[in-house]
């Protein structure tokens, strides 16, 4: 699993797309504000205060992320060591069963084969529990990143409100991370959707 910015790790490198998307988003915001400006001051578009953050850079430079990444890497190494040990036990027992197949009594052979199947099942269960969907790896990642994301969100919200930004975008992916409630058209869209039913 290759982590993204939401996950620990540095993520993929940014190209021109996010910058282009940011520019397109800005243009869309300004154009969508134009109908509200009719009849008001000519400087209406200038009244929109826009800003952006770069979460990729924050995740690369913030010490808290680096510490969380270190812990996450240690957890992964521990799980990998456990998985390797379990796989070694399976391989060793499989070799033992195959090499002693002709020498073991039917009862003893069945006992060894049952033990082998149990070890195989335990190994597969362990892998699924750690690396499967919703597994411990994903849960650990969430536990380590959610407090960091909450701190970033709190700071962005404070800056947005205190300094009266209309919208703050994320340069890394073009998402709005703060928006003035006056610009939120979600209720209107939901209202129109309700009329269409």
Image (spheres, helix red, strand yellow):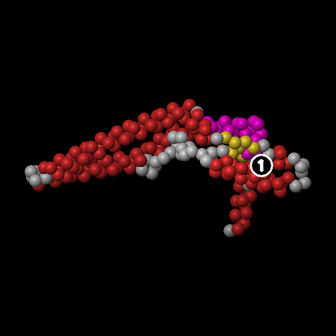
Image location of residue 153, percent across then percent down: 64, 40
**Quick check: is 163 in the magenta stretch?**
yes
Image location of residue 179, percent across then percent down: 72, 46
Residue 111 visible in the shown view? no
* Displayed quadrant of residue 39: bottom right
**Quick check: is 18 in the magenta stretch?**
no
The C terminus lies in quadrant? bottom right
Q: Is residue 134 above or below residue 9?
A: below
In this rendered view, identify the residue nearer to me: 130 or 173: 173
Image location of residue 98, percent across then percent down: 17, 52
- Give the magenta part as a residue range: 151-167
* 165 sits left or right of 170 in the view: right
> Which residue appears at 22% of the width and 45% of the height?
92
Q: Residues within 10 Å of mark 1 (few under 14, many from 20)?
A: few
* 91 sits left or right of 72 in the view: left
* Displayed quadrant of residue 35: bottom right
Please tell me whether mark 1 sits on a helix, a strand or a loop: helix
Image location of residue 18, percent across then percent down: 64, 49
Look at the magenta stretch and give its main secondary structure: helix
* Displayed quadrant of residue 64: top right
Per the image, the residue denoted by label 1 is 182
> Which residue appears at 17% of the width and 47% of the height?
96
Farthest front residue in view: 16
In this rendered view, identify the residue nearer to me: 167 or 118: 167
> Which residue appears at 70% of the width and 68% of the height?
196
């Amino acid at each position: 699993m290759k982590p993204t910015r939401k996950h620990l790790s540095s993520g993929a490198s940014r190209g021109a797309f996010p910058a282009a998307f940011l520019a397109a988003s800005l243009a869309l915001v300004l154009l969508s504000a134009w109908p509200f400006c009719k009849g008001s001051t000519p400087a209406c578009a200038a009244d929109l205060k826009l800003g952006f953050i770069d979460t990729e850079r924050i995740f690369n430079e913030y010490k808290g992320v680096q510490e969380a990444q270190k812990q996450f890497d240690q957890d992964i190494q521990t799980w990998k060591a456990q998985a390797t040990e379990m796989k070694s036990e399976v391989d060793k027992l499989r070799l033992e069963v195959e090499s002693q197949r002709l020498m073991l009594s039917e009862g003893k052979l069945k006992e060894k084969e049952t033990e082998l199947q149990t070890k195989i099942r335990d190994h597969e269960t362990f892998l699924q529990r750690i690396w499967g969907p919703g597994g411990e790896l994903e849960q650990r990642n969430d536990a380590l990143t959610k407090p960091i994301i909450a701190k970033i969100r709190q700071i962005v919200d404070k800056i947005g409100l205190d300094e009266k930004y209309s919208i703050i975008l994320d340069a890394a992916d073009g998402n709005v991370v703060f928006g003035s409630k006056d610009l939120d058209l979600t209720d209107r869209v939901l209202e129109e959707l309700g009329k269409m039913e």
